[in-house]
Amino acid sequence: MLDFRLPDLHGLEVCRALRAAGSAVDVLAVTSARDLAVVRTAVSLGVTHYLLKPFTFAAFRDKLHRYAEYRRQVLADGEVAAQHEVDRMFATLRGPAAHTLPKGLDEQTLRAVLGSLGGDAGRSASEVAGLAGISRVTARRYLEYLVAAERAVRAPRYGTPGRPEVEYRPA
């Protein structure tokens, strides 16, 4: 496990030094570095997993379990019989990411918000909050997460004097 933001040296430099020394050690990056150039370089240096901070324990556990299963497969003796076996090993390592919510959001509240969204009519954060039994601020945070995840759409609602209200509906 390697954090990229080290006090004396960037984690990518550590990776470069490992590769230059001929080390094939696997690296799990646990970092807050979000720059795409850093991610591309990490991939080119053979980083097996890239876990962004802050992360949940479930996301960390998933990465470790995937890595352990991958290692079990690649350390076996013999040869692969066909392409699908190689694909399976890579899928074990990369696989479909386990759905993890951002820190501070939980599945039960998310289900309540989704259930309160309704159909085509659209609802405001205040309306969703009332139906879900949560605060308006909490409802808006979950609704904005759903918009970012492309599971909901946001649109202005006109009709009353003053600023338009924002309404949300399922995507």
Image (spheres, rainbow, N blue to C red):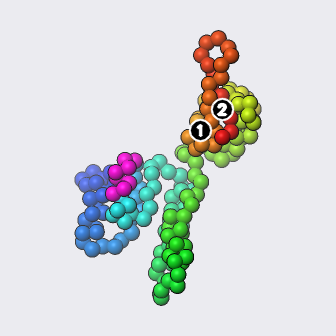
Front-lying residue, 13 or 163: 163
Q: Which quadrant would residue 1 be assigned to in this image? A: bottom left
Q: Position of residue 128 (x, y in %)?
A: 70, 31
Asked whether residue 171 is in view, the answer is yes
- Structural crowding at the residue carrying mark 2, measured as other residues with C-alpha within 10 Å and reported as few (<14), some (14–19) or many (≥20): many
Residue that sits furthest to the top in the current view: 161
Q: Position of residue 83 (x, y in %)?
A: 51, 77
Which mark is first along the chain, 1 or 2? 1
Label 2 sits on what residue type? Tyr
Drawn side of residue 46 relative to residue 96, left or right: left
- Secondary element at image label 2: strand
| In the depicted structure, whether residue 67 falls above or below residue 75 | above
> Is 4 a magenta residue?
no
**Where does label 2 land, which residue?**
168
Tell me the residue at 75%/36% (across/down): 119
Label 1 sits on what residue type? Val
Residue that sits furthest to the bottom in the current view: 78
Give the quadrant of the C terminus. top right
> Which segment is the magenta one?
34-41
| In the depicted structure, whether residue 148 falls above or below residue 8 | above
Whether label 2 touches label 1, CB < 8 Å: yes
> Is 36 a magenta residue?
yes
Q: Main secondary structure of the magenta part?
A: helix
Q: Position of residue 93 (x, y in %)?
A: 50, 67
**Where does label 1 land, which residue?**
147
Q: Position of residue 60 (x, y in %)?
A: 51, 58
